[in-house]
Amino acid sequence: MRTREKGKTVESPMVTRTRRAVKVVEEKERVEDSVTSAG
């Protein structure tokens, strides 16, 4: 765990960027799943 600052965990920009990319991919897959099941 990194040092906390202003209630937010401070991490390296690379980690933050990776987490964001993973989050976007997960959301995209979720949307595709819902579309597939609906279709």
Image (cartoon, rainbow, N blue to C red):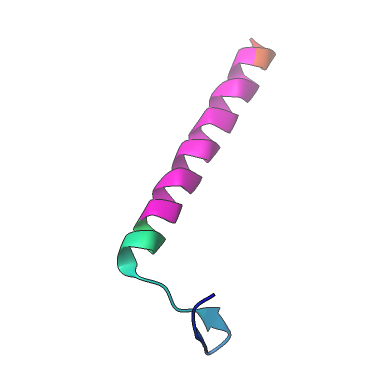
Which residue sits at x=53%, y=29%? 29
**30 in the magenta segment:** yes
Q: Residue furthest right?
A: 38
Quadrant in the picture for residue 11: bottom left
Q: Which residues are magenta?
A: 18-36
In the displayed structure, would residue 26 be above or below residue 23?
Answer: above
Instruction: Give the percent coordinates (x, y) of residue 36.
Output: 60, 14
Q: Quadrant of residue 15?
A: bottom left
Q: Quadrant of the N terminus?
A: bottom right
Could you tell me what secondary structure mostly forms the magenta stretch?
helix
Relative to 11, say whether 39 is above or below.
above
> Left or right of 18: which side holds 7?
right
Residue appearing at x 43%, y 53% in the figure: 20
Q: Nearer the viewer, residue 38 or 2?
A: 2
Residue 10 position within the rendered picture, expressed as x and y whole percent measured from the top left:
44, 78
Q: In the image, what residue occupies the spot 35% across and 70% down?
A: 12
